[in-house]
Image: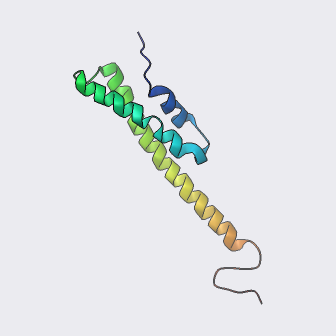
Amino acid sequence: MTIEHEWKDPYKTAVLGTDWSKMEERIRAPESPISARLREFSLNHGGTPEENQPIADAVNGLKARGERRGRVERTETRRLGSKQRTDGDEYIGTTRA
């Protein structure tokens, strides 16, 4: 028997999403339902092994996705900064004559 929990759909959206501008929101969406489910575990002797592992994997997956989001943002910032420095005749530290 497979039981679906609230955290699974938002987690899948975060992990499979490719729109990095929405990634922070998508990463945060499953955090609350996962936390709620973990609180439930504390009330029912730790939940079942069938759900404990997927939740642990989801928590690790969201953490990795968040780290990846940070790397994508830093790369994009550097790329845009580089483009701005090389566009046109002006360069940082020089003036047009």
Quadrant position of the C terminus in the picture: bottom right
Q: How many marks?
A: 0
Colouring scheme, one of rainbow, by chain, secondary structure, one colour: rainbow
80 lies above or below 88 = above
Spot the residue most to the left. 45
In this orientation, does residue 56 appear?
no
Would you identify the image quadrant in which residue 73 lies?
bottom right
Residue depicted at x 69% and y 79%? 91
In this orientation, does residue 30 appear?
yes
The image shows residue 61 at horizontal and vertical percentages of 44, 37
95 lies above or below 23 = below
Left or right relative to 76: residue 64: left
Residue depicted at x 65% and y 63%? 80
48 lies above or below 10 = above
Left or right relative to 3: residue 78: right
Residue depicted at x 24% and y 24%? 43
Residue depicted at x 51% and y 27%? 9
The image shows residue 35 at horizontal and vertical percentages of 35, 34
The image shows residue 37 at horizontal and vertical percentages of 34, 27
Quadrant position of the N terminus in the picture: top left
Spot the residue most to the top. 1
Left or right relative to 31: residue 72: right
Looking at this view, is 45 or 69 the one in front? Answer: 45
The image shows residue 76 at horizontal and vertical percentages of 60, 58
Would you identify the image quadrant in which residue 63 lies?
top left
Left or right relative to 18: residue 1: left
